[in-house]
Amino acid sequence: MNHSDSILVIGHRNPDTDAIASAIGYAWVLNESGSGHYMAGRTGKVNAQTAFALERFGVEAPTLVADVWGRVGDLAEKLPSLRKGQTLLEACQTIARTRRPAPLLDDSDKPIGLLTGAGLFGNLAEALSSASVLALAREFDRPAETAIDPSSTILNADEHIRDVIGQALRSEQDDFLVVDESGRYVGLCRKSALLAPPRRKLVMVDHNELGQAVPGLEEAEIIEVLDHHRLDNVPTLVPIRFHVEPVGSCSTLVAERGMERVGVLPGPIAGLLLCGILSDTLVFRSPTTTARDHSAANRLSRMAGLVDVKADDAQVTAAIAELGQALLAAGAGLGTRPAEEVISTDLKFYETGGLHVGIAQVEVASFRELAPRLNDLLEALRKLADSRKLALALLMVTDVVRGNSRLVVVGQSRIIASLPYARLDDGTLDAPEVVSRKKQLLPAVLAALSQLA
């Protein structure tokens, strides 16, 4: 099946483990429910922690989806073509059979032009009105390239539909040649299809904000949202299934739905969802953690083969803790990664009162990693603030061992001064016992912004 024909299940930009796990897991649940064909996607690179989880449970990363803008190639129809040297008779037969224009290609599959019924009739009109059968036969035997439409418009399959609408409206053609990046024939696209293209259908998981979503969302058709974040949802043309609950991880919601609808989840899916829960709850140390997260994790651990089905509670707890520590260790640390990569790996943008803020988060095993990288991180945050016109750019550095955070921040001094965190000698802000961006840091930042907007 063509990817554009499937319903896309996708998480937020700069996806974390929960976003990837939720997309893969929910696509599986929906496919098993028999309500359509669903495909998991991601709108960013797989980070080190997620790569560990995927490899640990033998799951492939979802397809990278850069955007969901409609593209010309989505509308191309692969119609029969003719080769240079074929005759007008063969062109007439092809057009009569398809009732559509016929592309004429060279030996490299690149279009020479388009043969239309009107064009062929114009070329054969004199011979058709002649009483000489021999004259008509000679005309039919002419090379097809002598009758191509010289005004044939060629579109690139990767072009956004919205970028070629104007060109389509100005053209008198009803069909356009479509080629790939190498200039080879892909198909024909009707003008009517360009003017009323189908919308890509998608399910949003682990987010409900336009600013966090895959680019081009406004041209897509959202059919469902499954999330555990604050509400800042995008408008929809028709009512949709919208499910948001205050749990620690979207993977918990996916696991609950899977167990309710299907029963037992496959080991790889169960293991990946377990990693999504452990990642987003920091192995249950985050204040966002609920009893439902614990319950889902315990059941998933057995399905994933992490413990024997007859294991007691202590064995389950120990196995989950061991996996959780390995998972956090895989994604923790600043290392030698470029500062821009550290910031962009888990970065989200927010807005209130016309002020925009970017908050990134990185996990470390010790704050000792921060000092040698502080200047690089500050410079990267300044560049981010300038390029995105942010009132505040902030990196939340979380010590996953001790459960504390330090804030590296640049932006308007009045906003920084209004944050309820003490400034340390190195200029960072001390945020003791703050580990959740969503439940602890974000409300404080938005409150400061709202007071100053």
Image (tube, rainbow, N blue to C red):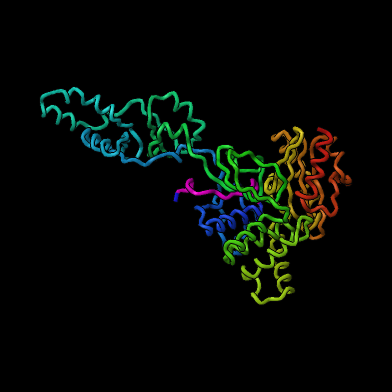
Residue 145 appears left or right of 373 = left
Indicate the quadrant containing the C terminus: top left, top right, bottom left or bottom right.
Answer: top right
In this view, 50 is above or below 211: below
Q: Give the residue at x 73% y 70%.
A: 317
In this view, 265 is above or below 443: below
Residue 64 appears left or right of 285 = left
Front one among 170 and 34: 34
Q: Please, which residue is most extreme toward the front here?
A: 239
Measured from the top left, where is residue 367 in percent x and y?
81, 54
In this view, 429 is above or below 114: below
The answer to which quarter of the image holds residue 134 is: top left
Measured from the top left, where is residue 1 in percent x and y?
44, 51
Residue 256 appears left or right of 197 = right
Give the magenta-colored segment's residue range: 2-15
Q: Give the residue at x 85% y 44%.
A: 427
Is residue 52 in view?
no
Front one among 210 and 372: 210
Residue 3 counted in the magenta span: yes
Measured from the top left, where is residue 198 in percent x and y?
48, 39
Front one among 225 and 404: 225
Q: Give the residue at x 71% y 76%.
A: 312
Measured from the top left, where is residue 403 in percent x and y?
81, 57
Residue 217 counted in the magenta span: no
Residue 190 appears left or right of 101 = right
In this view, 387 is above or below 3: above
